[in-house]
Amino acid sequence: MNTDAPNGLVIYFSFEMDMSNKRKTWQLLIFISFISVGLVTGQVSYSIPEEMAKGSLVGNLAQDLGLDPKRLKSGKGRIYTRDSGEYIDLNKDRGVLLIKDRIDREALCGQTTPCALHYQVILESPMELYSVTIEITDINDNPPHFEKEEMVFRISESATNGAKFVLERAMDLDVGINGLQGYSLTPSENFALKLLPQADGSKNVEMVLQKPLDREKQDQISLVLTAVDGGNPQLSGTAQIRISVLDVNDNAPVFTQAAYKAVITENAPKGTLVTTVSASDLDQGPNGKVTYSISNTLDDVRQIFQINEYSGEVTLIGSVDYEKARHYQINVRASDQGGLTDSCNILVDVLDTNDNTPSISIMSKSNIISEGFAQGTAVSILNVQDLDTGENGKVQCSINENIPFALKTTSTDFFSLVTDDELDRERNSEYNITVTCSDEGLPSLSSSVTLSLQISDINDNAPLFEKSTYVASIMENNSPGLSVFTVKARDVDWKQNARVSYILEESSISDVSVFSYVSINPESGVVHAVRSFDFEQLKDFTFHIKARDGGSPPLSSNVSVKILIQDQNDNAPQVLYPVRGGSLVAEMIPRSADVGYLVTKVVAVDVDSGQNAWLSYKLLKATDRALFEIGAQNGEIRTIRQVTDKDAVKQKLTVVVEDNGHPSRSATVNVNVALADSFPEVLSEFSDFTHDKDNDNLTFFLVLALAVVSFLFIVSIIAILSVKCYRWRRERSFYKYNGHLPVIPYYPPLYSDSVGTGTLQHVYNYEVCRTTDSRKSDLKYGRPYTESIISLDTSGAQTLRRADLDTLVSDDSKDQQKPPNQDWRFNQNQRPGPSGGE
């Protein structure tokens, strides 16, 4: 075992000496390994005999490398081999190398010495590389044997002492001391053996005649050639030599050269002429006819080369591969018909051609790498080899451009693929890295391999909303739980890091928590209304929503949301004036009132907004429709003709206030008008009102109130009536009533329009009291009082369809044909302002 420093130059020398032949054979095996710091941390070598049993211990790798056995297991230690086969196994639990399969040194290395297996042990996290060299020593498990069990010679009796006869060499697959060591010949009466060392280290065997043959005494000679090795125990093999003694052939063939040299290019086609040998024989006739043959037995020369037995031309019949064998030695024998022979050697050199593409082996590879890895992180280790030599074997490797990776040389034939820039999964989640290796031959050969690398995600992107702010609207009076709108945020990360949840940020709206107004689905981002909204109380509100991803730590972003409450026509108009209390209202008009006289003004409001609050006024019913009109926009009730003596004192008007919503809503109010020039006239009309049993108490208070103020009131009325009569008589010369509305109404001097809502200088409100006696009822309809559409109490605001309004108008036109039978009671109330509330 030999253990060397991690980063150095390792050289192995092997030296053998054959003492018997006094020859020295040097064999130099150099392994140069420039190892990169961080990948190769050591080199160890072992020596074991061949044919060890499976499971036998080779060596304690962990101990020899100074490693903790647990490191082999945690680092997923494994053995990488290129050409050595799977003979060795790594036990990661014990940290030892074991025999995995039977090792036959002869099958593995043949005659090559030393015979060694080369492995690399690879660890990960971090990546480490160790070189292991295992030398296989020979054991004497093969005896010498001859290819031919019998050799036949025809030797002339004229052969002189010293005549040589080349014998077939024995083969022994073992090497060194266990290989073939010598020969012996029995019996040895006429012949002796001679061993001739060759350039390749082998020995030719010659049988030398040391005593002349006598055909007359013995024409057939049988000898036994024994080959022995140097093992312990010693093994041997035999071959029979049969000699036929011929007469008179006393000259052996002789080659013109003892050694020939030839050059051939690898991958040369079959039939290529390698060289031509020539031998001559001084004999004449059949004894001088020479034939040639190849006598190699220890190698495969005869399967690659062929010699013409008559011409001596050596041609190629097999394939020549420079990477397998760079030199060949062909042993050629020339024989005449008398059995005399001579031999020569042909040394054939093989020239290399660029016929091997670089071979790329992936020793280690990461399939997934995080986008947050630092630059320079190794993701793969490659081994690149080219079996050619010289320029043909020099390899340059590169990868495809515009990717954040680089290829670095770590040692001879080893490359590492490392990150060269920041990785961003959002830009590119997968890379197909093509590694291309080319040699420097002409033409250049190349090969490539593609590595697929997935980029795993880290949470480096916060969710982003589709909009910077959201504005949504919802109709008031919505149902709780109604979906208002949906916010959407996207996260360009992956899987859990891109899983977005939505959170409603804590805030207050008018001192009320936002959670009392809206809620949000954390998965879908749908915003729901928690309560029913009222536009009249809240027109809009703003809150914030947070989008948070599922990374660790999570990232988030906020967005502002504004909800607009849309108005709905959910409020009917409210009549502010005339004020409706416990009794009905009445207005008094002097009979001298001019055309356009302002009777009163109906004031109403609608708390809705927009067109839902646009109010229009309509005279639904009237005792005499030809006498009054109402302004559709301002609600002013005016006379449209001159009051006559025929007009009833008691006039009742029903006004509908309608908004512009869809559907529209409305409210009704009754306005009672008294046509009289003096209070006594009014009181006389209202005198029978005392018979109303339901209003006895009210009548008492009214009479009492009238008695208190009657004196002052009568004086005022007399003065007013005097002035009115004077003006009326003067104006009659300008206006004559002819049964239709005047073109330009006349507004009395006491009328004033204040801020667009004109009213009387003195306003008198009258309350109409309904008697239990149907003959004295205020309103008489053709249906029971309980079925009346118009309510005369204080809750008279309601929503009426336009069809209902038209029905009321038609009913009123029928009622006008009936003579009024009305009972009135008069009550003066204080005057409200134009915009006074209820």
Image (cartoon, rainbow, N blue to C red):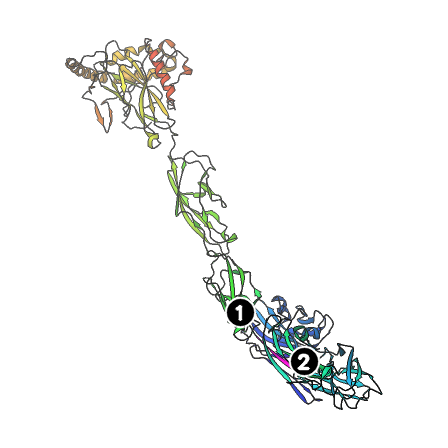
Judging depth in this view, the residue of 105 and 20 nearest the camera is 20
Q: Nearer the viewer, mark 1 or mark 2?
A: 2
534 on left or right of 263: left
Q: Quadrant of the N terminus?
A: bottom right
Answer yes or no: is residue 200 visible. Answer: no
Which residue is label 2 attached to? 331
Judging depth in this view, the residue of 497 and 746 nearest the camera is 497
Answer yes or no: is residue 829 visible. Answer: yes
**Mark sitting earlier along the chain (1/2):** 2
Which residue is label 1 attached to? 415
Amino acid at the residue labelled 2 = Asn
Q: Quadrant of the C terminus?
A: top left
715 on left or right of 705: left
Amino acid at the residue labelled 1 = Phe
631 on left or right of 230: left
Q: Disc 1 versus disc 2: distance between alpha carbons?
A: 45 Å
Judging depth in this view, the residue of 322 and 709 nearest the camera is 322
Residue 349 among those drawn in magenta: yes
Q: Is 751 placed above or below 222 here?
A: above
Which of the 4 quarters of the picture holds residue 197? bottom right
Q: Specify the segment rendered in magenta.
A: 345-355
- Residue extending furthest toward the front: 285
Task: Tell me where residue 627 appears, x and y as whole percent.
Answer: 26, 15
Task: Tell me where residue 118 appears, x and y as whole percent.
Answer: 63, 73
Task: Tell me where residue 65 appears, x and y as whole percent.
Answer: 62, 75
Q: How many marks?
A: 2
Residue 539 among those drawn in magenta: no
Q: What is the number of the mark on residue 645?
A: none
**Helix, strand or loop at mark 1:** strand
Most common SS among magenta residues: strand
Judging depth in this view, the residue of 689 and 768 nearest the camera is 768
